[in-house]
């Protein structure tokens, strides 16, 4: 699905998404990424939902978002609260949603000038059936 935007400027926005990819400002990503208003990071270790640990969530503390949107793929999944307790203790709201919903919600919140980060988990193409 393509998402259309008027004038993104320097702001990083989702412009499309599919089963095994997302696009940010027209650039395609096939692996898990973290999107902030002014950068896309691919150094996050999120390899797959079932492999997530506390250190994967601790990555986001230094980014200091107000809201972390966690795109879990085609279906919504929830991590155990103990895994992201450090984030909630730091006052960071954590929301788990499907990847399409995370992309749309991120675009709305960043347009409102909210301090939001989207973590998008994408499966390796060889594991998609």
Image (spheres, rainbow, N blue to C red):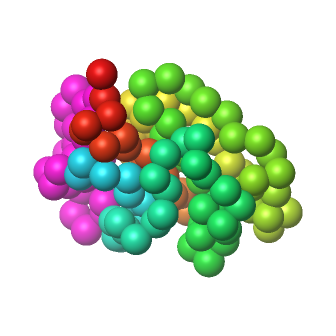
The image quadrant that residue 19 belongs to is top left
In the image, residue 92 lies at what x, y percent? 72, 59
The x, y position of residue 2, in whole percent, is 19, 31
- Residue 25, placed above or below residue 11: above
User: Is residue 105 at least partly visible in the picture?
Assistant: no
Q: Nearer the viewer, residue 64 or 125?
A: 125
- Left or right of 98: which side holds 65? right
Give the camera-side residue of 84 and 53.
53
**Farthest left residue in view:** 26
Left or right of 108 on screen, residue 21: left
Q: Position of residue 35 (x, y in %)?
A: 40, 59
Q: Which residues are magenta?
A: 1-28
From the viewer's side, name the closer residue of 88 and 43: 43
Residue 56 seen from this side? yes
Find residue 36 and report its image quarter.
bottom left
In this view, 86 is above or below 100: below
Residue at 59% from the left image edge and 41% from the top image edge? 50
Let me know if residue 53 is in the magenta part: no
**Where's the N terminus, which quadrant?**
top left
Q: Is residue 23 left or right of residue 94?
A: left
């Amino acid at each position: 699905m393509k998402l259309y935007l008027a004038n993104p400027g320097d702001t990083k926005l989702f412009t499309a998404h599919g089963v095994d990819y997302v696009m940010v400002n027209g650039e395609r990503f096939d692996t898990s990424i973290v999107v902030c208003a002014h950068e896309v990071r691919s150094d996050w270790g999120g390899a797959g939902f079932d492999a997530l640990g506390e250190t994967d969530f601790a990555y986001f503390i230094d980014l200091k978002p107000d809201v972390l949107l966690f795109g879990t793929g085609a279906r919504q999944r929830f991590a155990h609260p103990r895994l992201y307790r450090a984030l909630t203790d730091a006052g960071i709201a954590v929301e788990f949603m499907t990847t399409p919903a995370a992309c749309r919600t991120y675009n709305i919140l960043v347009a409102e000038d909210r301090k939001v980060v989207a973590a998008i988990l994408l499966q390796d193409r060889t594991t998609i059936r």
